[in-house]
Image (tube, rainbow, N blue to C red):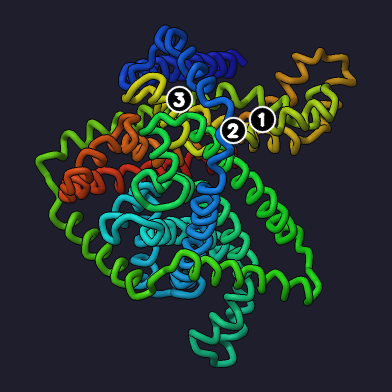
Amino acid sequence: MAQWTERARGEIWLRRLGFFLGLLFLIALYGWALRGVEFDLSSIFKYGGKFFELLGRMYPPDFSALPQLVRPLLQTLQMATLGTFFGALMALPLVVFGSQLVVRSALIYWPVRMIMNILRTIPDLLYAVLFVAAMGFGPAAGVGALSFFACAIIAKLTSESADNINPKPIEAVEAVGAGKLQVIRYAVLPQLIPAFIDHVIYVFELNVRVSAVMGYVGAGGMGMQLTTAMEWRNYSQVLTIALLIFALVIVIDLVANRIRDAFVQGIVLPRPLRFLGLSVVATLIVWSFISLEVDFNRLVKGFDYFRNLVWAIVTDPATEYFELAVQRMIQSLQIALVGTTISFLLSVPLGFLAARRHVGMPVAFAVGMKQIPNIIRAFPELILAIFFIATFGPGPLPGVLAIAIHSIGMLGKFNAEIVEKIRKEPVEALQSSGASRLQVFRYAVLPQVLPEFLALFIYRFEINVRAASVLGIVGAGGIGSLINEAQSYRAWDIVGICLVVIIPTVMVIDFLSARIRKKLIEG
């Protein structure tokens, strides 16, 4: 008995020591990160008023500019449409040949997986920079960039679905002597298509946001109008453009979410409605082709030039800038860490307030609170960064604030969904035993939601590392600032060394993030 007691005391002491050492590590980590991003609360309070002063100068919006903004707004939608269409076509073979259930040869499977991972590590705005260099200014560059961005996301998401499909239909088709193409046609694609379409719709929704800001680097759409308005300090028009982008994103979100919900719930539409839906999609693609005046030959040549450009900058990077690129990449990691942490701390209470259960508030209040993250996440990080740079000046702090604000919208939405899904039995058991609301929260609610909150925080950090890598293109610090300097002088060898640093960094973070999230969720 004494031996058992001594062992228990030792375990308790070790747990306390581990907690203490972990706390010291976090204090040191955040001290290092806050210093690296020049985070200063006094400066935020001192100059934060300028942000609201800037918003005041934007009001009222200049709706007289609407006629000249309709075309760029439609151009943004068309770029997203064609980018998603081409990206889906590019992703499908990667998904099929990147599945071990379909391709059992390691010589094919692993190279395809490597291509998928590399494509996913390159930030969206960096694709735009490269395609503008390859194709020149205009929407064609935006379509090319969005195609690769869409391909990377669709391939990643659908490949995860491909790894979980039922192998029995594949074995049955192979048993009757079918060839590889027949196996894919009759056993793989029927299982993959629903998930594939679901992911295509999700990526189209993302592409609308991304295409709205790609014009900042010359890739067409509303981003070019926003850049011009900011340069001329036409703040009333800036607000008009921001409201139009917001309205477009909200409408696309609502429509896309309804369609995706129908797919998830397995709702089978009548044949006339399915035909109508396909006709609308086909019409949208053809309209985008015609309206954007996409020259297919130019597009093919642009893709070929893009491939040659990427090959040249990767095979001959400016190694003398390696140390500087690493330093800037470290700052991007610090920006992502601090911004994600701020958003996490603010989105946790928002998630509880926006949940319709377990908050003790009227449903109408929860529904109202739920609209806050929906509104916030409609504004891309780049637009927020531009506003904060106008307030605080260039540097990493605007990048931190842009990532923090945008991530509140994303984390708040998903946190609310996590709270709504918790099991009510532990809550009711403690309530029936006379526990206080604080005790119910501490012992019944928090243990259920905290692992998923932390997993979501880590996943968001993974996404924000990519965002922080390119925010410097508009002056918000990190390795993007080096990319911006290099591309303005067309020093593509410096962009190459930036890619050499970004790609492995993002891949390592993705790998560690996936392992930690799996551990948190599975316990």
Relative to 51, residue 145 above or below: below
Camera-side residue of 107 and 463: 463
Task: Residue at 75% x, 14% y: name it.
Answer: 438
Q: Is residue 17 visible?
A: no
Between the residue at mark 2 and the residue at mark 1, the CA separation in whole angstroms equals 6 Å
Location of residue 464 in the rendering, given as x and y in whole percent from the top left corner:
44, 37
Q: Which residue is mark 1?
A: 372
Q: Name the element at disc 1.
A: helix
Q: Name the element at disc 2.
A: helix
Q: Is residue 482 visible?
A: yes
Tell me the kind of residue under disc 3. Answer: Leu
Relative to 7, residue 73 above or below: below
Instruction: Give the number of the disc on residue 96.
Output: none
Task: Residue at 23% x, 37% y: name it.
Answer: 482
Tell me the kind of residue under disc 1. Answer: Ile
Horizontally, is 348 left or right of 431 in the view? left
- Identify the mark nearer the N-term, 1 or 3: 1
Horizontally, is 319 left or right of 520 in the view? left
Q: Which residue is mark 2?
A: 376
Location of residue 98 in the rendering, given as x and y in whole percent from the top left corner:
44, 68
Q: Quadrant of residue 20?
A: top left
Relative to 430, residue 373 above or below: below
Q: Which residue is mark 3?
A: 401
Location of residue 399 in the rendering, given as x and y in whole percent from the top left corner:
40, 29
Task: Residue at 75% x, 38% y: name it.
Answer: 421
Between the residue at mark 3 and the residue at mark 2, the CA separation in whole angstroms equals 13 Å
Q: Name the element at disc 3.
A: helix
Q: Quadrant of residue 197?
A: bottom right
Camera-side residue of 508 and 253: 253
Answer yes or no: do the residues labelled 2 and 1 have beta carbons within 8 Å? Answer: yes
Camera-side residue of 142 and 104: 142
Q: Quadrant of residue 245?
A: top right
